[in-house]
Each structure stands twice: as C-alpha cells, then as structure tokens.
Image (cartoon, coloured by chain):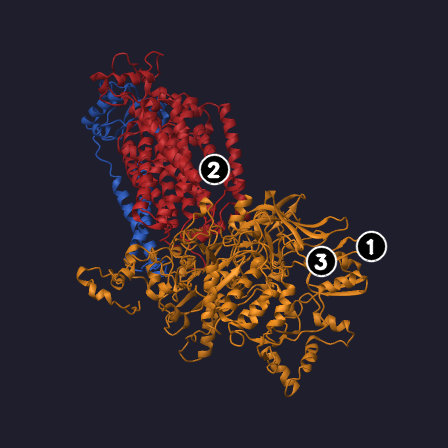
Chain colours: A red, B orange, C blue
Amino acid sequence: MNGTTTVPDLIEAEASPSVEQRLKRVPLVLNKRNFNWITERIAGVNEGPAPRWWWVSFAISAMVAGIGMFCLGYQISTGVGTWGLNHPVGWAWDITNFVFWIGIGHAGTLISAILFLLRQKWRTSINRSAEAMTLFAVICAAIFPGVHVGRVWMAWFMAPLPNNYGIWPNFRSPLLWDVFAVSTYFSVSVLFWYTGLIPDLATLRDRATNKIKKLLYGIFAVGWRGSNRNWRHYEMAYLLLAGLSTPLVLSVHSVVSFDFATSVIPTWHTTIFPPYFVAGAIFGGFAMVLTLLVPARAIYKLHDVITPQHVDKMAKIILLTGSIVSYAYAMEFFVAWYSGNQYEKYAFYNRILGPYWWYWWVGMLFCNFLTPQLFWFKRFRFNIYVVYFVCMCVNAGMWFERFIIIVGGLHRDFLPSSWGMFYPTWVDIWTFVGTFGIFLSLFLLFIRFLPMIAMSEVKIVLPEADPHHTTPEGHHTVQAGGMERT
Amino acid sequence: MNRLYVVENRYSLTGAMADHRLRIPASQIPAFAHALAGKIAVATQDAGLGSVIATLAPAAGSMQFDDRWLTECAADLMSKPGASLVIAGPMQPVVVQLLAYGINAALKNVGTTLLIRDFPRNPKTNSLLQLAAEINADRVKQLFIFGGDPVYNAPRSLQEDRDTRKTQHWEDLQKKVPQVVRLGYFEDGTSAASHWHVPAAHYLESWGDALTSEGAYLTIQPMILPLFRGVSEIELMHGLLGGPKLEGPELVQETFRMTAPPGEFNAAWSQLLRDGFAGHIMPADKPPTFNGNAAGGVAHTLWAPAPMPTPDSPEIVLVRSYSVDDGRYINNGWLQELPDPVTKLTWDNAALMSPALARHHKINTGDLIEITVTETTLDADQKSVQRQLVIPIMVAPGHADCSITIPLGYGRSVAGGKPLTYSGGGNPADNSPGGDTIGFNAYLLRTSTNPHFITADAKTVTGVKIAKMPGKHLLATTQEHWSIEGRGLVREATIERYREDNEFVKKIAGDEELPPKLPTLYTHPKLDAPQQWGMAVDLNVCTGCSACVIACQAENNVPIVGKLQVSHGRSMHWLRIDRYFADAKGFNQDRGQTPDDPEMVHEPMMCQHCENAPCETVCPVNATVHSEDGLNVMAYNRCIGTRYCANNCPFKVRRFNFFDYNQRPVGKKKIVSSLGVYQEYLGPLTKKGAPDTIKLRNNPNVTVRMRGVMEKCTYCVQRIEEAKIAAKVNAGPSDNTRIPRDSFTSACAQACPTDAIVFGDIADPESRVSKMKAQDRNYRLLEYLNVKTRTSYLARIRNPNPKMPDSHEIGVASPATHEHVDASEGKHNFEEHDRGTLDESQQPTDEQNADAKPVPKETP
Amino acid sequence: MAAEYASAAALYEAAKKVRDAGFKRWDVHSPFPIHGMDDAMGLGKSWLSAPVLIGGITGLLTAATLTFGPSWFIYPLVVHGKPYNWKTVPAFFPIMFELTVLFSAFTCFFAMLIMNGLPRWYHPIFNWDRFARATNDGFFLVIEARDPRFTEKEARQLLESTGGQHLTVVHED
C-alpha cells in the first residue's frame, strides 16, 4: 500500500533527521486510517465467527485450567502437604505465584492510569487489553491467598464478619492489608475497565446484528449515546479514577511487599521492598502485556494501531523499570554488606552461592538485568523477535526473583538447625501452570467478545479528532456517511 | 568444677559433655587402658595395679597414643586422689574392667567415689549359648520363651548341626525343639518359629517385682487392667509351675513374704505398694579389696589386644540404639521418630563412619555399602564363614577413623511379610533392601565371640571389607545443617574465660554492640497477671538425651508423621534438641567440609514465648495473641493456616499440620504391589478416625489438632490452668489464689534427668527460674531483634585442662568476640560500655582501669 | 431537531454557534469526547469531584473506625507488644488508604452514572437510524424542542448554516 510507513523508514527518519522531520511526530495510527476503519477492524474481531485457532487455543487453555482446578481440589481436600512446603519453608510457589500475578496486573493499571495522567497518547491502543490483563491476573493471583491456607473453608475469618468467637481479624497483619488492598485493587480495576468499556459496548450494540448480542451489549452499555453532556462527567470520572488508581497501584504492590518487609527474617526485613516490588511489578507486567499483544496484533493484523512505536515505548519502559530493579538488587547487596549484620550478610552470600544459586544467576542476573539492556539499542527495540525473547526472559526472571526472595529468605534464616531445602511437587507445578490456563482462557474470551482495543480512545488520537485540525493534502477525506474510499 | 575425659570411638552424649575427648577405635581401648594404667602405676607406685599390668604386653600393631595426652590425663587424675573416677564402658572386655578397677584402686577411689555392692545373682542362670548347646544335643523337649526375640537378636552361628555340620542359627535351633511356647507382645519372628504364642500383658498392665543393680527391691504395679487380655509373666510362670490359680498381687506377696518384712504383713504390704520399694532391704556396701595378683592372672588369660584397624579393614562396633534399644521398641512410633541425639536420624539406622573414612572409600551419607566379615571358622563346605550386611552409611563428625558404628535394634521383621505396625496407626515400612522392615539388621553380623566389636584380629576374624553398592537409601534426619555458622546461639566458654570475665556471655559477637536497654518507640501494653511464666535452660547440664522431646510429645498429643514426612522436613516435635558441631578452625558445610574432631553442643529449642512475638502481629485472624501472664497462646480453632507466623518466627519452632496426622493414617500403602503410595497423599480416600489405642493414649487435657492448623509449645498451658484451678479451689473464700512457688512444672522440665530445663514464675524473685535467670551466664537468643524471649539459656562452661595438647580447641562453639572487647588489654572499661555511657568525661582513666572490678549487675 | 456533521471540527464550530444563539437544551453526540467541546457548549467543569471527595472521607473514617474500634475499645488484644493507644496507627495506614480509595472509586463510578442519568436504555434519539453512526464515526448535534428558544424554523436555519446535514426531526415515540 502506498504511504505505508515502515520500520526502516522510521529508523532512517531519525537517523538523519532534518529539522522538519525531527519535529514531526510519528503518527500513532499508521497509514492514515480513519474512524470507521478503526471501528471496523476492532469490532470486526468480535462480530465475526471465532476462527479455528481460537477454538483450539481455548480448548487447550481450558484443559490446562481444568488440570489446575483439579490440583487445587486435591490440595484442599488432602492437605497443604501435597505441595512441597515444610518447616522452615512455609511459603514457596503459592506466594511466589501470588506476587507474580499481582505484579503482572500492575502494568495494566500503569498503562491505563499513570500514562493517562502523564498524557501519553500512545497508551490508547494498548490500555484496554492491558486492563483486561490486569483483571485476569488479579483473579489468578487472588486464588492463591485463598487456597494456600490450611483450612480454606475458614478463610472467611479474614473478613470482619461476625463469628461466634466474637473475635476481630488482626488489622495489623500484612496479610489482612493484602486482603483489603487486593480486593480494592480488583474492584477499582473492574470499575475503571468497565467505565472505559461503556462507549465501546455502545459501538458494538449499535453494530450488533442479532438480537441477543444487541440485548447483552445494550444492557452493559447502559444506554450510552455519546452525548457530550455525558462525556463531560465521563471524562471527569475517568480522570478521577485514573488519579485514584495511580496511588492505588503503587500502594497495592507496596502492601504486598509488606508481607515480607514487615517480618524479621533476614532478606525480608528491608525497607527497599515497596519501591523494588512496584518497579518490578511494572517491569514484569509490561513484559506480559507485550507477550499477549505481540501475537494478538500479528494475528488480527493490528499493526497500524499497535505500531512499532508503541512496542518501542513499551520496551523503553521495560528498560527503565528493569534498571530500577537491577539497581535495587545491587543496593540490597550493598546494604547487606554495609550493615555488618551477620545474618543479613550471610543471607545474601547464600543468595548467590548457596543451594539456590542458579535461580539468582539465571533468573535475576541474566533475565532481569542483562536481557533488558538490549533495549538500549534501537535496532533491538524495533526487532519484534528480540523484543519477544526479552519479554519471555523477563516473565521468567520475575518469577525467579520472587522465588529467591521468598524461599531464599525462609530456607536459611537465623538458626542453622532449622535450615532446610524446598522442592516443588507436581501439585505445585500444575497448580501454577493451571493459572496460566485460567489466565489465557479468560484472555481468549475477552478477545472474542469484547473489543481488545479502546476504540473511542484511539479515535481521539487520530489527527481528525482534533477540532482545530485541517485536512492536509493527500489525506483521505471523510465523506458524509463516513465510508472509507480507497 | 568437674573435668571429664572421654575416650570413645563414636560421639556419645557422654562424649558431648566431655572436656577432653579422644577418639580411637573401640578395639584399641584395651590398649589405651593398658597405657593409661602403665602411666598411673608408675606414678603412684601402686602394687596391685602394677601386678596386673606386668603380665600384659601391648599387641603388635596396636594404636600408638599421643604421649602428652596420656601423661597429662594421668597427671590430672593423680592430682586428686580419692576424688576421681575411671569407668570402662559396659561393652568393653573383662580385662578393661579389671584395668579400670585397678586404676581406681591405685587412685584411692575405691570406697570414696567407687562403691562395691553385693548383687544377688540366681546361680541357676544359664546363658543362651548353653541352651543352644543343649538344644543341639536334643536334650530340650519343651521351651518357653518369655519376651525377647531370640530369632532376631540371638548371636549368629550358635551351633553346628551334628550330622550335616551346617551352621545353626537360633531360628534353626528353635525349630528343632518339639514344643515351643512364646509369651510376647506381638507376633514377631520368634513367634513364627514357635508353636504357641501367648499375648503378653504390657509391663504397665502386670504385677511383678524387681531388684535394681544397687540391690533395692521394687514392685511392678500395673497402671491399668490388660487392654487386650494379655497374660503377665508371673501369671504364666505360676501356671507352668502348676500352682493354684493366683492373681498377680498374690504372687508378688508370696515373694515379698520371703524377704521377711518386719511388722505385720498386711501393713508392710500396703507400705510396699505405697512406696514402691521395700525399705527393709538395704543395699550393703562391701569393703573395698583389690587382689592384684588374681586380677593379673585373669587379665593375662583374657588379654587379646587387637591390631589397629585400617581404612580398608575397619572395625565394626555394634551398639544399642538410643531410641529402640536392642530392638524391643521397634513398634514404638514415638521412639522411631525421636531423632537420635547425635546423628538426628529417625526411622532408620545407618553405619556411622568418620569423614576421613568416608573420603577414603569415596562414599557419602546415604550411599549403600556391603560389609563383609570373614571369620576364621570354617563352614560345612570348608569355606570361611562370611557374614554380610548391606547398610547405608552416615558421615559422623567426631567418629574415630577406621571404625564403623552400627546401632542395633532395626531391621526386625515378621515372618510372613507383614511388617510391624507402629503406634501411629499407619504403616511406615520403607523400601529398604531387606523388604518390609525398618532399618537394617546388624544382628546379622553379631556372633557370641564378637558381640560388640568386630575387628580383623586374625584370631576370630580374618577380614572386614567395605564395598560400595549401587543405589542410595533415603535417611530421614530432622536437622540437616550442623555448623553453627559463627552465630552466638549456643554460647560457651572455658572456665578460665568465665572467671576472667563473668559477663562474657553478653559479649558474644552480635550482642556486644547492644545497649543495656533496647530502645522502644512506644510503651508496650502491660502484662499484668500477678504470676508471669518463664523458662530457663541450663546448657551446662543439658546432655541432649531427648527425654524432654518425648515428654512433650506425650503430654501434648504431638503426632508422629512417618519417615517420608520427616525427610521432607515436616516433623512435628514442638521441642527439638539442636545439635551443633563446632571446630576451632571453622568449616564450611556447604562446601562439603566436615570436621574430623569437633565439639558437640546441644540446645533444646521450644517456643521462646517472646513478649514482642513476631508471630503474633502477622496472623491475619488473631489466632495467636499474648496472654496477660506472658504466654504466646495459640487458638487452634481460629487458625486458618496461612503459615505466616511460622515464617516470621526467627527460631522456627512453629509446627504446621500439613496433613491430617491425627485422624488419617500416615505411611506407605501398597497399591498395585510395587507402586508404593503414601497414605497421607490419598487423604479423602483413606479411613478417617484414629485407632482406639491412640485415642486412649492421648492426653484428654490437650486439644488434638486437625489438618491445616499451626501448633507449638504452649509452656504446657494445660498444666498452668490446672494449677490455677487447684489454687483457686484451695483458696476457697479467701483472695489468695496464687499458685504456690515451684509447685508444678511443664512436661519437659519434669522429664529432664539433669534439671536442665526449669520452668516457673519469673515475677517471683525467689522461684527457681528467677534465680537461674539472675545468674551471669544467662542470655537470650537473638537479643538484637528485641523480641524479649521468656525462655533464656545459661551458657555452657567447659573445663579443659590447660596442659592438655588440645585445650585450645575446647569451648569454641561461640564465635570469637571482636578485638575491642579484649579485657586483658585493660584499655576499655566494659561495664561503662555496657551501660551505654560512651561520654568522654565518663570514661575511666588508666589508673582506674588498672584495678577495675566487675560492677554488680543491675537488675533490669 | 438533529443534524449530522462531517467532522469533529465542523461540529465544534457548530456547537459554538448554537451556544451563542442561546440555546440551553441541546446536545452534541460524538464517538469520542472532542477536545474543547465543553467550552464550545458553554458547559463548566464537571463537579463529579465533590461526591468523590465525600466518598473518600467516608472511606477514611470507616477504616479508622473499623481498625481502631476493636484494637482500642471493643476487643483489645496484646499482639506483638503493639500499643493500644493512638501510637499504633501506623499499622492501620494501609487499610485506611485502601478503603479511602475504594470508597472514592465506587462513589466516582456511581456518581458518574447518576449524574449522566444512566442507565437509560431508551432514548428517543435511538429511533433515528442514522444515529447509529454516533458511536462509530458520526458527529451529531441535537436541539431539543423543550428548549424555550426552540422554533423549528430557526433551529433548521441555524443548523444548516453551520454545515449540518441530514437534518431530521426526531419524535419522542
């Protein structure tokens, strides 16, 4: 197609820029698409029949989710001993998975809320999927605190509900802060996501061909008609929710990090954890966003909306947060040495040279520190294969990091007599894999039934959305009726 | 203070308490005794001892001992005549016992530290060997076996069949007897080879009497009528003798009558039952004599010193297991799961060897070896008799080189393949090479000529060979890491250091920078009950015997979990004994460095009941909170099992019920023959509910915990509450509901044979525990965390002889203190530093430092 | 009276004219919020923030009561030696923060719906079939007959003069 801006063009453009070229912003939607194209392309995914690959993937992920459910049922009916936990390692894969999934969720909120407050328009093509990913990740995460307890049928004790002992939950406990934080995070994310969905659901309602779809989309679109009086409050609500979500996302992972930071165990008892965890969460979350969106855009040919620029910017954020995380790693070691505290010093010596050494060298050093450094180079940021490789490494690396913190801290703490090793069982492993199944199943359902890109928001970033925009030469003109003319 | 020298081949608890320890192969101990006797004879010029050793010559090739060690040890013994004691172990041959007696006589101990008592022996007692000979000669028509398990633990190769000349073990002999009746607790191998098995009543269900080794006469009184209608020994024997039917008490009365109790018989009988012993039977001391010449003659006849074993032909030492003894307690789940105090091994035995021997053979803990003992006797085919045993090894720091110790009592099986069930209700059999047995049967190596040591002495044994076998055996230990890693957890010092600086315990690395009172941001809520509970553990007298562990398990219904779960690190003992090895040089256990000759220290660890307990704050449901009398209490019914409290406990004393140990069976279940699945992993498919015997066993005062609940030491809160109730009842209408001082105690303190654990009211300055805590050896673990533990420890003091060559290696378990706390330089005044006054003007001058005296300790 | 426009810019200009003409009951419809349209319509800032503030304060007070009540008044327990009095408040900060945010967010969402008069599944404008483009790429301006200045002729004139197309009278049934 003529006028297509390709990657080499972009690189060339920035390699030998003239002043005009330097000042010209790279368009966020390529190929000069118009509103209708966006609607057609994005809503078209939901309106057509599900392609075969979707059914196959869904079947596989549902099966994996089923295996995960079976493992959970087995563990709840038989005992926590079916996992590899022991004395001293009371938490291992269960809480590692919990923190892993919650961390992934944070990227979605960052994209939706923080980038919104920072007026980063490029967020619009990825924020819907990212927020959906947040919700599904939080669902997967929230499974674990519920089921990892020894007596799941009494987990409701954590809520301040009346019970026959007349006893209240312990509000000083970080686990209870988690309960409040994660449920708040989930609720607010649902609200935020749903608020953003309303106009798009209206679009789907208006285009719906069969009655059931029209009814369902119509109910959830709450009668939206695009009225500016509504838009006015809507925009304010969006801004407020974004403003609320920003401190929320920072606080939620800080509260999750308090699970460890407020304890007395050597590697856990450190104030570096809240920023470390939040940065790490965003780091891992962006990697997961890219992991999901890169195939999705390839399959649905959304390269014009999720452009290489978007990937580039996300890669830069990965590099930034990865560097923060790496700095935090270095600081931990420095502070351990500087403190002179023998328990702390040993704990970090054990991290790199102890029995779990390879988790650190492969997971934290290679995956989290070294691979994102490739993103300093533009060549790699625009090479989708390199980007994908780095994202997979980061996903794995973040899991290893949490494991090293949790198990590494527990298995060797103060009294050498209680030192022990942890080995996962098949139940541990398949429960975790099962959560991936749940996550992917939900994501596939989301792609199938809901618009994966925020159409109304992407339209705002098109040049013609601006009321002061004048149509330049060579642009497609919008005819009355809005049908695209090629 | 006493000083203890121990000479042994393996680490025993006595060796752990020793100030100086020499590790030599057990077969060389006669040579050592001879050498020591020589030194003492020369120095004391004692004629008796001299005539004993004059007849003995050291064996060619026996071990050479460090002359300085011997000399100084002898000199030390001789420095206090009449105040020392030399004891030879019960497995040592008669010659060594004679030498020890002679040494004691030379040191003038006999009559002062060593008393002689007359012990009445039944002249008609024969040995098993004589019985075996009689059976082989077909002279025995009926055999009654009361208890024991001779098929299992009789020496091997007792006789030869007269016709076929084949070797006869006890089992073959027993099968020759036309009628065998066996009285036993359960149907074991001996019962399988008998014609009749009569179920025995447990000794706690039986009447009887006994004589102690000191000569006192005791009664055996039942606690309960026989649960399973067993028959007691005296009842069966009385029946055999054809007497009229009498009940247990009457039988005992018959014997009691024969001791001629003074006064009216019924009154004397009631007194006997009340006291448990007969007051009128006094053990009589015999006057001390030592006939050196006669002893010398006997010694000369029996003297058979063995040459030094080599790494390729080590000696084998067979010892009784700390937990199952000679095999009699194999069916006791508590004892099976009790970690061996030295090796921390459960549910198994293993061949213990020194790190050097293991390195020589290139084997490691868990590897299987085959021990082959080749004897000089020939079998029916004129080939040397060989005895073999396949057993895993365990590397034991502090073990003598060229020596292997194997605990007896394991590998006991039942003919017919049915394994012995243990009192946990499940089936703990493991896939050891011997089939459905627990552990490895070392009796296969035991003969009557070499019942305790097997060494290639060319007289009875030509060779002992070790061969590595393929495969490994899972050994379940409760403690993997035994290096103390330079942490001030078990604190000890030599008595010199203690005398130099009474406050040494506060200056161990980690604590020396602490101010006397740790700062706090806020005031803690007052714990205002009039009596506050605390505990002190005196590490100086704790031997590591683990009686407290079993007492706690018995009192608090602590479940056993079976071998697999112990190997996964899930043992449920609320109280554990941590055992560390410490070396002056230091070693890195992770890099596979094991010390050859370290010290061993013990530390009982139970919930420390911290006033600022880190476990309390992290429980989301308030299942663990603090009581006003200072206990960290655990509400089982509120606990949902997040395990955060266990994670946050710096001492890792909390125990989580990973499975339903109390209600569901634990252990292996054979499904599809070889596919062994452990029953705890089949949870809902197994039978729910504890067996009746378990329900009877449980302490009704203590809740039985279900799966998913956290538990830990409660300072025996049920006993505290019982005492409170009793005090209230006794008080009646008055207000004084105080529990009388030291009137009750926790189960562990009650069981401790040395009173190392003391429990009581710390708000009362006169209680035993307060007095212990006021001692200057008192310290708390991890003080810098400011958790304010209610359990404190008294540091261990060792008393090495400064002239001994290894004295600098004693008392090294605590990490070295830093340079600036070197008192001998006199430049820094500790007391001021300890009080936190670092102000220049307040530092004493050099003059003042020169005669600084220890300032009396302030009561905190 | 409803009119369709060709672009966001056109709609923007038209809105300004309608505002200047003094109409009060009228609205513009677009698939996305047009930048500056609020001013063009003469609407001020949205006061959604007020209920949200109230919601947040309610959340904060709820959390404070929920956490302080049991630990100081109802059922004080000795936990880790933490004090009973106000000095224990740092332990409660996370819950206070979370509930503030939670209550604010819910208030925001429901206040937005209420202030928008949503859910309103029926609206007369849906009867116009061209209106379906409002959620796709169409721009509409509607002047309601209820407006006191409304006359059909004037409205038609005004809308045509600003470039409106497909003028339609939409009835309320």
Tag 1: amino acid: Asp
Percent x, y of residue B706 = 53, 56
Amino acid at circle 2 = Thr
Report the Cα–Cα distance between label 1 and label 2: 74 Å
Extreme-left residue of the structure: B841
Chain letter of mark 3 equals B
Q: Amino acid at mark 3?
A: Val
Give the residue pinned by disc 1.
Answer: B163
Kindly indicate whether the residue at mark 2 contacts the one at mark 3 (C-beta within 8 angstroms).
Answer: no
**Could you say which is closer to the camera, residue C27 or residue A84?**
A84
Res. A222 visible in picture: no
Q: Position of residue C60 (x, y in %)?
A: 29, 49
- Of circles 3 and 2, the one toward us is 3
Whether residue B342 is visible = yes
Q: Residues within 10 Å of mark 3 (few under 14, many from 20)?
A: many
SS label for mark 1: loop
Q: Secondary structure at mark 2?
A: helix
Q: Are marks 1 and 2 on the same chain?
A: no
Residue at far bottom of view: B263
Instruction: Find disc 3 in the rendering and name its residue.
Output: B151
User: In the picture, residue A123 is in which quadrant?
Assistant: top left
Q: Chain of mark 1?
A: B
Q: Is residue C152 above or below residue B345?
A: above
- Please tell me which residue is depicted at 51% across the width and 74% down the height of the picture: B108
**Labels 3, 2: one chain:** no
Q: Residues within 10 Å of mark 2 (few under 14, many from 20)?
A: many
Tell me the number on the disc at residue A435.
2
